Image (cartoon, rainbow, N blue to C red):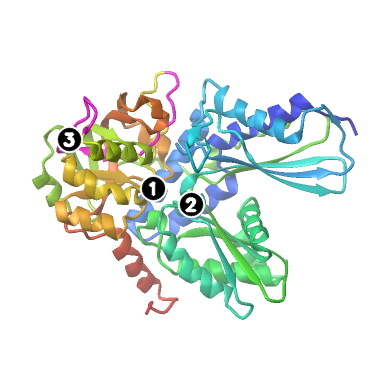
Amino acid sequence: MPAIQKEDFIQSIADGFQFISYYHPLDYVQAVARAYEKEENPAAKDAIAQILTNSRMCAEGHRPICQDTGMAVVFLEIGQDVRWDTDTTIEEMVNEGVRRAYTQFDDNLLRASILVDPAGSRKNSGDNAPAIIHYEMVAGDKVDVTVAAKGGGSENKAKLAMLNPSDDIVEWVLKTVPTLGAGWCPPGVLGVGVGGTPEKAMYLAKKSLMAPVDIQDLIERGPNSTAEELRLELFEKVNALGIGAQGLGGLTTVVDVKVLDAPTHAASKPVGLAPNCAANRHVHFTLDGTGPAELTPPPLSAWPDIGWKPSSEAKSVDLSTLTKEEVASWKLGDRILLNGKILTGRDAAHKRIQTLYESGEGLPEGVDFTDRVIYYVGPVDPVGDEAVGPAGPTTATRMDKFTEMMLEKTGLVAMIGKAERGPVALEAIKKHQAAYLMATGGAAYLISKAIRSSRVVAFDELGMEAIYEFEVENMPVTVAVDSSGESVHKIAPAIWRKKIGKLPEPA
């Protein structure tokens, strides 16, 4: 076998991460298209339509599926007879490939999200390196590579349980999945790892997500192992929870469930749970020393011709004249098209604002939230004539602890994000007669087309976490929490669980 060249390996890693930033695996697209066809909840069906439309737009435009272009994860199966034509370590080559992918493609710049010194300064590395690398030595003279980009919204929902040997895995998963909320952006794939040690169970759960979506094939042929029996049972019962797309209630929460297992200690039953979100980014290739990987683009004809458009029932809102009284008139589930100027801010900006208030300084010059809406977002940098790159919502629950401060001190009247709000935020929203609006996670490029202009107004040094002012035109959102504090994420899944009727009502 020819030796694998350093440059071929690095370029293949870089090309792989670029490829998955804008191409969904076709098996996932087809599975989501099936979910769209059978979905009966209009709100969930609309969200799935946005996800599929966004997917095709990204495939056409070669722009990121999600603004969170992910933490770089690389699985390597290295043949023990492989020869390398380099003195550079594999880890160094992988990280150089990641740096190229995220910083050197000027027509598709990817967002740098990786922070070094995680317990201290949390400074952005600027190039999304280093990657998380998993190695296996196998027989043969080739290197099998799988690259994946895992966003924070889904990674933050990973769970590990050290069950007793007599405990039921299905029972634990069905109790756990509702606690994940919607921050992992369903419909997606659940990975389950069983056995080994705690870290092995989590590794198996993550690795399982790299396999093709093939649950329908398994349903047709039937299971051949305990792991496949578990897949089928979990697929049916997790969907019977009624969580639905984006947590809005509906028939499809997962398009597949994956299970990998390993031998374990007699006293142990480790179970790892890893969700993969609607971005679902991974690709596999093999290097044999004959050159870099060749990644074949999927045909655009493979995408369903849905062409999402705003609902005719959507209300147009002029943000320049928005009042608390108008916000209080919004009803749960209302579809709204926002027009005018909004401010952005997420974790770091909220923390900075809190510090400024505690010091007595108040908001920075030029930042005024009075009767305005904030969007929880960290956008991708623009290319060409874009006002902004893909700019989908981040998980709103991370801002819950700041909500009372923002509503009480700044004059803010509404917030936009993805996923549910927790009890602290719900109480603050009710107290201040505000509202929480949900944008679709997994529709970042589609949403960015509603943003006509963008400028940084504060905290420029925070990069994608700075406060921006966006001018938007017909930006689609849904009222997820109204001024009474009622939440669609609490009400809708319960309704759909009862409609589906395959699980007993929770105690």
The spot of residue 281 in percent (x, y) is 57, 43
Q: Residue at x 15, y 40 (%)?
A: 411
Of residue 132 and residue 297, the one placed in the foreground of this image is: 132
Badge 1 or badge 2: first in the primary sequence: 2
Q: Secondary structure at mark 3?
A: helix
Q: Secondary structure at mark 1?
A: loop
Give the amino acid at mark 1: Thr
Q: Which residue is mark 2?
A: 156
Give the label, 3 or 2, closer to the camera: 2
Q: Image quadrant for the C terminus?
A: bottom left
* Residue 367: in magenta span: yes
Badge 3 or badge 2: first in the primary sequence: 2
Of residue 166 and residue 489, the one placed in the foreground of this image is: 166
Give the amino acid at mark 3: Leu
* Residue 466: in magenta span: no
| Relative horizontal placement of residue 190, taking residue 414 as reference (left or right) | right
> What separation in Å lies between label 1 and label 2 (alpha carbons)?
10 Å
Q: Which residue is mark 1?
A: 395
> What separation in Å lies between label 1 and label 3 (alpha carbons)?
23 Å
The image's mark for residue 277 is none
Q: Secondary structure at mark 2?
A: loop
Tell me if mark 3 has few (under 14), some (14-19) or many (20+) residues whose alpha carbon lies within 10 angstroms of its own. some
Q: Look at the picture and state if 169 lies above or below 417.
A: below
Q: Quadrant of residue 39?
A: bottom left
Residue 482 appears in the rendering = no
| Relative horizontal placement of residue 399, taking residue 329 as reference (left or right) | right
Give the amino acid at mark 2: Asn
The spot of residue 279 in percent (x, y) is 50, 44
The spot of residue 217 in percent (x, y) is 64, 61
Q: Quadrant of residue 258?
A: bottom right
User: Which residues, given as a range, are shown in magenta?
Assistant: 361-384
